[in-house]
């Protein structure tokens, strides 16, 4: 597998030597970065190749201008991910705002006749076409006024979330599996279940103990679910 400079920028933890037979691209929450998935790499390797997505304006890309609209963002991701779509089966996981990014990138792959993910895993996110537009920045960041003032990418993610309007069509071909914390007031079961309207395939809703941050507090359960869902793709 040849890794281009653009691909390396968006997927800094990608390894050309991974022995895993299935790849999981992980899209961060609003105000998040690829580093939030770093612990997943060791926890799930070698069964699953975890590929965190690094967007412009954060961590090693801090000097780059962050992207502020969904069309601009998924177009850039399309260019970066294009060389990585054919060497092994892959799936998308997106948490919070990342769920919407993963979904819209799946739509763009389909519309450009490229390989699509075998699964779209959406986490801590109401279905976008049924939810009132609102910033999806985690509560900890919202309450930290200094962070919002000093980190341009946090403001950019808020702008992206507020400007994003989802269409109900076209639906994606991939199954959508929705994950949610049982105590998350931002992702109530009825709102999350509406993701079923956005796929032509199957839909499943799985809940975990915890709130919006269940992926950290219930990681053992989440990791088990990921292995269960992704293992068949490797066969």
Image (tube, rainbow, N blue to C red):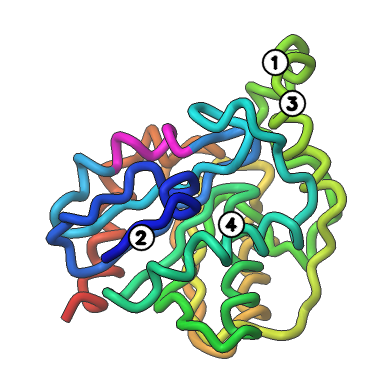
Q: Mark 1 against mark 3, which lies toward the viewer?
A: 3
The spot of residue 52 in percent (x, y) is: 41, 47
Provide residue 166's location: percent of width, then percent of height.
79, 67
Instruction: Find disc 4 in the rendering and name its residue.
Output: 99
Total number of numbered discs in the rendering: 4
Q: Earlier in the sequence, mark 1 or mark 4?
A: 4
Q: Between marks 3 and 2, how big is the CA–CA gap?
A: 28 Å
Compared across the picture, whether 64 is left or right of 156 comes to left
- Where's the N terminus, which quadrant? bottom left
Residue that mark 3 sits on: 152
| Marks 3 and 4 close (CB-CB < 8 Å) | no
- For numbered disc 3, what is the local secondary structure? helix
The stretch in magenta equals 34-40
Looking at the image, the residue that sits furthest to the top is 146
What is the crowding at mark 3: few (fewer than 14 residues within 10 Å), some, or many (at least 20)? some
The residues bearing labels 1 and 4 have C-alpha atoms spaced at a distance of 23 Å
Q: Which quadrant of the figure contains the C terminus?
A: bottom left
Q: Residue at x 73, y 45 (%)?
A: 67
Mark pair 1, 2: CA separation: 30 Å
| Label 1 with label 2: CB-CB less than 8 Å | no
**Residue 183 image position (x, y, % from top left):** 56, 41
Q: Main secondary structure of the magenta part?
A: helix
Q: Residue at 63% across / 26% down in the picture?
A: 63
Drawn side of residue 177 relative to residue 158, left or right: left
For disc 1, the marked residue is 147
Give the label, 2 or 4, closer to the camera: 2
Residue 24 tag number: 2
């Amino acid at each position: 597998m040849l890794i281009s400079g653009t691909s390396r920028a968006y997927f800094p933890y990608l390894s050309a030597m991974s022995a895993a037979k299935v790849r999981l691209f992980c899209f961060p929450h609003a105000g998040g970065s690829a580093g939030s998935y770093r612990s997943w790499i060791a926890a799930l390797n070698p069964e699953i190749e975890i590929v965190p997505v690094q967007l412009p304006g954060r961590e090693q890309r801090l000097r780059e201008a962050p992207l502020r609209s969904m069309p601009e963002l998924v177009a850039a991701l399309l260019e970066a991910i294009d060389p990585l779509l054919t060497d092994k089966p892959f799936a998308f996981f997106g948490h919070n705002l990342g769920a919407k990014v993963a979904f819209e990138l799946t739509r763009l792959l389909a519309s450009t006749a490229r390989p699509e993910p075998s699964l779209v895993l959406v986490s801590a996110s109401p279905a976008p076409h049924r939810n009132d537009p609102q910033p999806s920045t985690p509560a900890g960041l919202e309450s930290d006024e200094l962070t919002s003032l000093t980190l341009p990418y946090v403001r950019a993610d808020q702008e992206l979330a507020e400007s994003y309007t989802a269409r109900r069509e076209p639906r994606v071909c991939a199954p959508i599996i929705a994950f949610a914390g049982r105590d998350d007031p931002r992702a109530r079961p009825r709102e999350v279940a509406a993701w079923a309207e956005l796929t032509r395939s199957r839909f499943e809703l799985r809940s975990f103990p915890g709130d919006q941050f269940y992926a950290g507090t219930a990681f053992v359960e989440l990791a088990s679910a990921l292995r269960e869902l992704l293992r068949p793709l490797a066969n």
